[in-house]
Image (cartoon, rainbow, N blue to C red):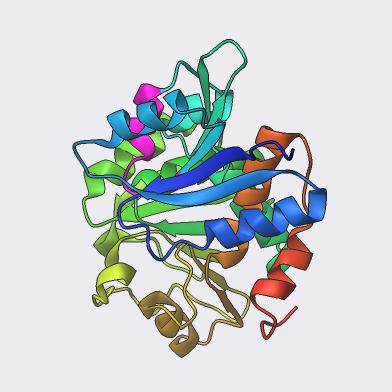
Amino acid sequence: MTPEPDRYAVIGNPIAHSRSPEIHQLFADQTGEHISYEKILAEHDDFQDAIQRFFEAGGRGLNVTLPFKGDAFEWVDRRTELAEHAGAVNTLIAQDDGTCLGANTDGIGLLRDLKKSLRLSIQDTRILILGAGGAVRGILEPLLQEKPALLLIANRTPERAEALAEHFRAHGQIRGCGLGAIEPGPYDLVVHATSAALQDQDLGLPDTLVGPQTRCYDLLYSDTATPFMRWAKAQGAPQVTDGFGMLLEQAAESFYLWRGKRPDTAMARNYLRPDAPP
């Protein structure tokens, strides 16, 4: 008799849009791993109870998406070094002793996709990150480890950007400011990580950020251009992409942490987005 598959899931709110079940099923088919993977919608006041129920029912691992990465950080028994520094957890891993390990694969995922999709080397570049929320916390240390000349965080509330920069100051050249006080560009890389794209708001960005070599990257993924992507293309950015590649790469890292096997993300990308440019 075939044993029950090991159970995994992604948890968040909203969650209906998530493509993580498709991705992890592809990874499982590639690697011959016997797993199931589902979506869990958690209410804002029930998140920690929801993950407790999942693991008590035999769940082996969870991906955590917005807005619960900070809550997951608080819930786990211990954390990887990257997650500890980020103050945010996006991957939960059940341990044999009954405890739960929290990891953050966001920054690793972004870095791998920047190198694969945009063929970008981070060293000595000038990077602008728009936004200072939970999504940003997970990407800063891996980016700073690549030694950019400058990493500037700009946020509607300057104090949040400045506090985040101060938190990571020991890791490299990083500063924070308000959206109205961004240092003149052009930048080598502009990363969009605010919630404005979800709400189709005017980003109110200056016209001096993008030059002929600027790559623009939206952490959100969408089958149609996001407001930031439309803005970047209008500014003449030669390469503009959404966060689907980051989603694949961070998912692959989560899968590796769970199963000890590293899936082929290029194969998954070709299957899920066959019309996308290589």
Q: Nearer the viewer, residue 81 or 62?
A: 62
Image coordinates of residue 184 in percent, x first then y, are 42, 67
Q: Residue at x 75, y 44 (%)?
A: 33
Q: Position of residue 163 (x, y in %)?
A: 31, 36
**Quadrant for the N terminus in the image:** top right
Is 26 placed left or right of 237 in the picture? right
Q: Is residue 68 magenta?
A: yes
The image quadrant of residue 117 is bottom right
Figure disc tally: 0
Residue sitting nearer the eye, 241 or 168: 241
Residue pushed farthest top? 97
Which residue reaches farthest front? Answer: 1
Residue at x 48%, y 24% (from the top left corner):
84
Residue extent of the magenta highlight: 64-75
In the rendering, at what x and y percent does residue 269 appear? Answer: 69, 69
Res. 253 image quadrant: top right
Q: Is residue 125 visible?
A: no
Magenta span includes 113: no
The image shows residue 188, relative to residue 11, as above or below, that is below
Q: Identify the residue at image location x=72%, y=65%.
A: 268
Residue 45, placed above or below residue 247: above
Classify the position of the C terminus by image quarter. Answer: bottom right
- On screen, residue 52 above or below 10: above
Residue 161: image location, x then y, percent: 32, 45
Say above or below: 68 vs 216.
Answer: above
Q: Determine the image quadrant of residue 73.
A: top left
Image-based side of 65 in relation to 268, left or right: left
Residue 88 visible? yes
